[in-house]
Amino acid sequence: MRESRNSRLLRILAIWVLIVWAVLPFAFMLRVGFAAPSDIHGGAPDWLAPLYAFNFVDLFGDEEFMSAIGRSVLVAVVSSAIAIAAATPAAYACARMRFRGRSDFEFWVLSTRMLPAVVVVIPYFVLFREIGGIDTVWALTVMHTVVNLAVTFFLLRSFFSDLPGEVFEAADLDGCSETRKFLSVAWPMVRNGVAAAAVLNFIFSWNEFVFALTLASGEAKTVSVAMLGFIQFQSVAVGPMMAAGTLAVLPVAIVLFLSQKQLVTGMSFGAVKG
């Protein structure tokens, strides 16, 4: 059925409304970041005022904040890599193999995300304090890996479960081992899904705040914790904070831009079967 002209115009209008709705907060944040303190009234900028670049200049010269961004990138990349490396073979085994205790293992993985972070953060704090992990990058990396592992496992498990069984039956007829089936049959078909899971891991780790604040709020602070430095007892440095927020968004935006094809393909994996 051919789409009518009015329906097409309404669809285009709806898309543009969604785009504007999504872009407006970032445009506001960017404009406040480029506003002088005297041009910000009640948190809103004077839109016609001249651009003020010193908020960004000061941030690039702030070694503590730039180091926090670097640590956030390091923690997000390493924790994502570890979670993917651990979850991928486990997800394949649970999706394509039958073995004793599989349901119990899956339930155990699921149980690691049954409680909110605020409930378990104190026990984890005590644990890492006892082993000397407070305010260290490695402890925060381990914690982010643990937090993201369950989501990664079940996401990848669904990808492996959606693979057609016929290709594995053909591999069995050819005498392929499980390792060969994983590397030569399953992996080429789900690698976009694995890439999507890695991107989601990166975003979750980048945005995580509760464990970052509790376990690494000193020398090893990440960018989400460093943002609190712009909030004082009786004042808020609105301009510098918005400039910092703009810089904090950039790494995630770059990752999403570079991996948008893999992300869309991976997240739509198995949606259409024929």
Image (spheres, rainbow, N blue to C red):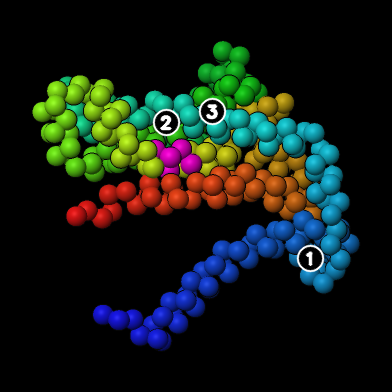
Q: Residue 111, relative to residue 249: is it above or below?
A: above
Look at the numbered discs 3 and 2 and tell me whether their residues touch, using CB distance below 8 Å: no
Instruction: Say if residue 107 shows up in the picture.
Output: no
Q: In the displayed image of the protein, which residue is found farthest to the left?
A: 173
At a point 84% along the width and 62% down the height, the residue shown is: 51
Q: Is residue 265 magenta?
A: no
Q: In the displayed image of the protein, which residue is found farthest to the top?
A: 131
Label 2's element?
A: helix
Q: Residue 156, relative to residue 93: is it above or below?
A: below
Label 3's element?
A: helix
Q: Earlier in the sequence, mark 1 or mark 3?
A: 1
x and y, in percent, of residue 259 in the image: 50, 46
x and y, in percent, of residue 255 in the image: 56, 44
At a point 39% along the width and 25% down the height, the residue shown is: 86
In whole angstroms, how far apart are the C-alphas of marks 1 and 3?
38 Å
The residue under label 2 is: 84
- In the displayed structure image, the side of residue 75 where residue 189 appears, left or right: left
State the extent of the magenta-drawn residues as a range.
Answer: 194-199
Label ID, residue 45: 1
Q: Earlier in the sequence, mark 3 or mark 2?
A: 3
Magenta span dominant secondary structure: helix
